[in-house]
């Protein structure tokens, strides 16, 4: 097929292909209409792996980080869980940051930047889909990792 035919084909198909995508919602803004940004719903499962929840709580030997199992999140209300991730203050009022806990530091320095939707997605996933059996699968992976090496400089 020649280049001109390919260009003609692309021009003919462009309107049809454009019609395959949904139109973004329109929001009135001061007399004008503007397309509202479409935010993707975050995946709680994806986030617990990307943010590092699973790594610290289940994939690191307890001798290095003695983090409690993630099933503990089931006992937190959404508001308590948000407070934990934003401030490092546990449900029982302990300030993990003030105690020098890694969770307190991570909460204040990293997790506090998560959106409400991301925190909600993480909490929903941990409450509804995270099980002790799944945690055991993650902890079994520790044996497959090479042992840590600590270098003295």
Image: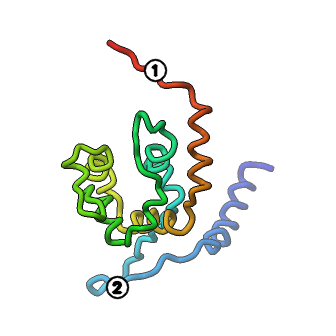
Q: Where 25 sits versus 86, above or below?
A: below
For disc 1, the marked residue is 149
Query: Residue at the spot x=66%, y=64% of the render?
Result: 11
CA separation in Å, label 2 and label 1: 59 Å
Q: Where 124 sits versus 109, above or below?
A: below
Q: Nearer the viewer, residue 36 or 116?
A: 116
Residue 67 percent coordinates (x, y): 40, 46
For disc 2, the marked residue is 28
Q: Secondary structure at mark 1?
A: loop
Q: From the viewer's perspective, is 45 left or right of 122?
A: right
Residue situated furthest top in the rendering: 153
Instruction: Tell me which label, 2 or 1, sits earlier in the chain.
Output: 2
Query: Residue at the spot x=30%, y=64% of the render?
Result: 91
Crowd rating for badge 2 (residues with CA inside 10 Å; few <14, some 14–19, many 20+): few
Classify the position of the C terminus by image quarter: top left
Q: Nearer the viewer, residue 24 or 67?
A: 67
Residue 112 percent coordinates (x, y): 29, 56
In which quadrant of the rendered view does residue 36 lie? bottom left
Crowd rating for badge 1 (residues with CA inside 10 Å; few <14, some 14–19, many 20+): few
Q: Secondary structure at mark 2?
A: strand
How many marks are shown on the rendered structure?
Answer: 2
């Amino acid at each position: 097929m020649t280049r001109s035919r390919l260009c003609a084909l692309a021009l003919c198909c462009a309107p049809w292909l454009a019609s395959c995508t949904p139109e973004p919602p329109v929001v009135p803004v001061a007399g004008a209409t503007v397309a509202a940004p479409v935010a993707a719903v975050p995946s709680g499962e994806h986030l617990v792996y990307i943010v590092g929840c699973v790594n610290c709580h289940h994939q690191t030997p307890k001798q290095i980080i003695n983090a409690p199992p993630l099933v503990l999140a089931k006992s937190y209300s959404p508001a308590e869980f948000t407070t934990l991730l934003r401030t490092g203050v546990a449900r029982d009022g302990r300030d993990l940051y003030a105690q020098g806990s890694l969770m307190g530091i991570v909460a204040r320095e990293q997790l506090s930047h998560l959106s409400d939707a991301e925190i909600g997605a993480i909490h929903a996933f941990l409450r509804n889909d995270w099980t002790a059996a799944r945690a055991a699968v993650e902890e079994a992976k520790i044996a497959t990792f090479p042992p840590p090496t600590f270098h003295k400089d």
